[in-house]
Image (spheres, grey):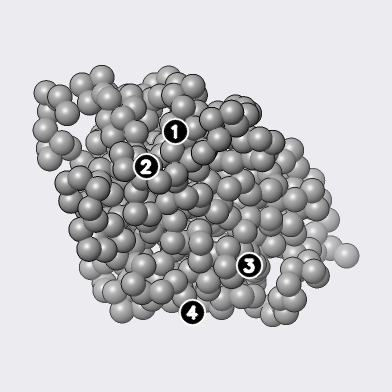
Amino acid sequence: MASTESAEDLTDEELRKLLMPDPTVEQVVDAIRQSFVQDSAADIQVIKELDSYDDKNVWISINGTNYLAKVHNGVESKDLMDRLVEGDKIASTAFTSSSIHLQNAMMIHLNQHGIATNQPQEAVQTADTRLPTPGAVHSLPVKSKDHSPYPLVVRLLGWVPGRPMSSFPMLPIEALANAGIFLGKLSTCLSKLPSDQLQAAKRYHQWDGKNTMDLRDFVHYIDDSRKRSMVESVIDAFQTELIDSKVAESSFSKSLIHADFNDANFLLDDSFRISGVIDFGDSVESWRILDLSVALAYSLITVYGKQDRSLSAAAAMLRGYNSVCPLTEVERKHLLLLMACRLSCSVTLGAYSYKQNPENEYLLLHSGPGWNALDLIWGTDPTRRASMKTIIDGLFDRACSKSFPVDGETTPIDCSDLAFPDPSLEDPLAAARGKF
């Protein structure tokens, strides 16, 4: 590939921006037809191009059946291709150490255990495009003209019914508790993926919460000095309280995690029940508690949370999760910091990514609400921060204090005692409270 800058000199996140897929939808459809559809007369229709952080996702139908056509970022594509020998021979089982194979293995495993997600489709047997794991390789444009065209992995995935939680105009608080129950079951199921499929899960990933200190390389992309200092204080607290103290090393168990359980990646039916989960691009082996802290961080900016009910949303999701996977006292004590770490990662890498690709408005999806949420739970005033930690820790203790049986999600968990407004919202009944 032609480039004035060596790939070895770039961070993973920087290289992702250069190698972000940039084919037309017509080129995506052509790749699908060549590699996955044996019938040349098959009717392939483009329904909608979907938002993506650093891949290319297109919702299509083939002869009336819905599928997701996914073109992977050049980083993951190269990761898989580098594990293959020249020609069409496979170098032992080296391909199982690729992140794309890990995603396929996770999807197959979850579907086999009753958790709905995309089902990888096998490619047609052609020597030039077929891979040892479900997928194909096509030479396609990427954002960097110096790197185009680039060999990218294309996958055809079965469609998961339902709508992303983020698309609902309103939500009951029970939907957040239900999502927590689902995440607990998902975490339990992922922990049972056979160990011979986990090589790729041990990779480095910038979005992995245990790598929070590496955000220091990107904070200068935050223009606002107050916001920048807020993120820097989160990074400092992470280093002091979890790394230097050895708390994370001694107290946080490790497991395969989804690592991006946000309201765009799990789907609901019309009764607000979880119908499936998608997007395993960030999945790694890391601290198991991070799956929950990521979910809680994003719960603050769900449609329910953004109605001045962000802390209520987090408490409800925690109650659901804790009903399936009870937390230890140490895990609960550090939830707030880990939530702040994820929000800091999102807004910091979002600021960096937007400067590299300013036409991609999707990169700003969580930016404004993310900053607001981080300001609420963390802020820049140490005294206020300590006060908020006491309040939120007490709230989380309350969320975990009640035990609820989880009977297949048929009976909603009662969250009426958690349904209250954020501290920033004026309470019109404040004067009456405690007087009657």
Distance in Å between CA atoms under marks 2 and 1:
9 Å
The answer to whether residue 343 is left or right of residue 353 is right
**Residue 210, horizontal then vertical, whole percent:** 32, 60
Quadrant where the image shows the N terminus: top left
Name the residue: 25% across, 19% down.
145
**Type of amino acid at the residue the image marks with label 4:** Thr
Q: Earlier in the sequence, mark 1 or mark 4?
A: 1
Name the residue beneath numbered marker 1: 34
Mark found first going from the N terminus, 3 or 2: 3
Q: Is residue 355 visible?
A: no
Q: Is residue 84 shown to the viewer in this render?
A: yes
Tell me the amino acid under the disc marked 3.
Answer: Gly
Residue 355 lies left or right of residue 401; in this view the side is left
Going 15% across and 24% down the picture, which residue do you hit?
A: 2
Q: Which residue is mark 4?
A: 328
On the image, the x and y values in percent for residue 215 come to 28, 46
Q: Could you tell which of marks 1 and 3 lies nearer the N-terminus?
A: 1
Residue at the (50%, 52%) spot, across then down? 120
Q: Are marks 2 and 1 in contact (CB under 8 Å)?
A: yes
Name the residue beneath numbered marker 3: 114
**Marks 1/4: CA–CA distance:** 51 Å
Residue labelled with disc 2: 126
Q: Is residue 228 above or below residue 280?
A: above
Label 3, label 2: how many angstroms apart (C-alpha)? Answer: 32 Å
Which residue is painted at 41% across and 74% down in the image?
194
Q: Nearer the viewer, mark 1 or mark 3?
A: 1
The mark nearer the N terminus, 3 or 4, is: 3
Specify the quadrant that holds the C terminus: bottom right
